[in-house]
Image: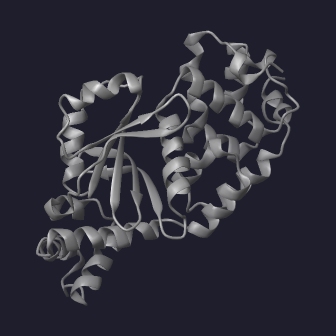
Amino acid sequence: MKALSKIKLDEKYYNAIGRIFTPVVMDSLVQKGNSGYLSEVCTNSGLIDKIDLSMNLGQFFDCIYSILFKNYRNEYIYKNTIANKILLGKHSLNTSHMLTEFRVGKCKADAVVLNGTSTVYEIKSELDSFARLEKQIQAYMSIFDRINVITSDSQANKLKSFLPQSVGILVLTDRNTISTIREPESNKNDINQSILFDSFRKSEYIKAIKLHFGTVPNVPNTKIFRECKKLFCEIPPDVAHDLMVKILRERSNSMVLKEFIDRAPNSLSAYAISICNEKAKLQKLISLLSSKLSSVIIPELT
């Protein structure tokens, strides 16, 4: 097998290879135990002739991740780096949680880390444009304490020219580190309670009202959303923010996630976080990671 740093593929295949870490491909692999998509991508790109089919699936994921990091740093590469370097590197799964694709108004936040506060990371990789960034930042300022944009070194200076001064700028370096260009400023005193409320699930906004007011309005179920929202909007912005952090951190099954993280390759951290409450799926994936690559992709080729 060639050294990973020397594996070269036609550029037209990197997008397809990058999709290996998407939920649709990963979930299918976990459900069936093998993957036609992996087989097709490895065959069509010529990767199957450049890797050792006796490696296990966990090693294969790390191999793919290394190829992508060097040649095609897509959104998953950035999310996974945030997971490994910030959530797992600076914090603890016992006290912190990371949400991905979290809905804020009409936007979805790429990654949100919740510990003593809330910090959002909007990813603008080398493959992205800044077309929607202004609207995204405005949305994030409505509910998060600290807002960051993480990008490549080549795009950082462009961000400085139009991002609000309160927004942090981070760079994913070629050395697989996150460099801080500008620190974010605290924003939690200016959050919008109405928009924050709309990001909650029903069980979460009911819990928020109970925690702050001690009781939930005694109204018909058809009116509970409206009445709870009215009350929530009376809570001071910083208090509402802290309630959000407390409640959203409970979305994570930290024990199940920690067990997986301890046994899985670093390349799968972001995927594991996205399904952290699906214990059976995580356990099935753990059992698959020791399988020979040939048993995972070859059945679909014959």
* Residue 183 locus on image (x, y percent): 30, 47
> In the displayed image of the protein, which residue is found farthest to the right?
54
- Most distant residue in the top direction: 10
Can the viewer see residue 243 in this picture?
yes
Q: Position of residue 139 (x, y in %)?
A: 21, 47
Residue visible at 69% across and 41% down? 29
Q: Quadrant of the C terminus?
A: top right
Q: Position of residue 272 (x, y in %)?
A: 59, 52
Q: Residue furthest bottom?
A: 214
Give the residue displayed 85% in from the left and 35% down from the top.
295
User: Residue sitting at 80 percent across and 18 percent down?
Assistant: 2
Image quadrant assignment for residue 93:
bottom right
Counting labels gives 0
Q: Height in image: 219 above or below 162?
A: below
Q: Is residue 149 above or below residue 85?
A: above
Nearest the viewer among 279 and 263 is 263
Q: Is residue 76 left or right of residue 222?
A: right
Residue 84 falls left or right of residue 56: left
Q: Which quarter of the picture shows residue 32?
A: top right
Figure quadrant of the N terminus? top right
Residue at the spot x=19%, y=85% of the render? 217
**Closer to the camera, 24 or 45?**
45
Q: Is residue 248 left or right of residue 96?
A: left
Question: What's the coloring here?
Answer: one colour
**Residue 199 to residue 213: above or below:** above
Can residue 222 be seen? no
